[in-house]
Amino acid sequence: MTDEHGNCPACNADMNGGSIWETGLAFALAGKHYRQQGVPATGEEAERLADDYAEAYGAHRTKGRWGRAIGIVENDSVARWQCPYCGHEWAR
């Protein structure tokens, strides 16, 4: 996977989280996708549900990672970021 979120400018911690698509796949296999009503999916159906999940976040099977930086919201938008490890804040 690519570096989509960079590193903390203070402590250099990696701000890239896991794959959004793989999170969707895990939800589908566990029956936790909103379309499943608690019934686990397998195989191609689980992959289709993961595709649907990732698409909702603008991601797909090979692109789209969660970010670890915490967004500090001011006036209904993210004004700056904060490192979850060292607490350093930097401009958006």
Image (cartoon, rainbow, N blue to C red):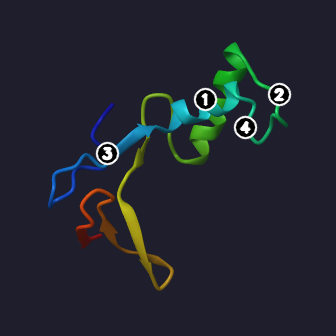
Is residue 24 positioned above or below 67 on the image? above
Indicate which disc, 2 or 4, sits on the residue closer to the N terminus.
Answer: 4
Amino acid carrying label 3: it is: Glu
Amino acid carrying label 1: it is: Ala
What residue is at 43 percent from the left and 29 percent from the top? Answer: 62
What residue is at 68 percent from the left and 24 percent from the top? Answer: 29
- Residue 46, image x and y in percent? 68, 23
Q: Nearer the viewer, residue 63 or 38?
A: 38
For the residues marked 2 and 4, what is the alpha-carbon distance in whole angstroms? Answer: 9 Å
Give the residue pinned by disc 3. Answer: 4
- Residue 80, image x and y in percent? 32, 73
Indicate which disc, 2 or 3, sits on the residue closer to the N terminus.
Answer: 3
Label 1 crowding class (10 Å Cα cut-off): few <14, some 14-19, many 20+?
A: some
Quadrant the N terminus occupies: top left
Which SS class for mark 3?
loop
The mark tally for this picture is 4
Give the residue pinned by disc 4. Answer: 33
Amino acid carrying label 2: it is: Val
Amino acid carrying label 4: it is: His
Q: Residue furthest top?
A: 43
Give the residue pinned by disc 1. Answer: 26
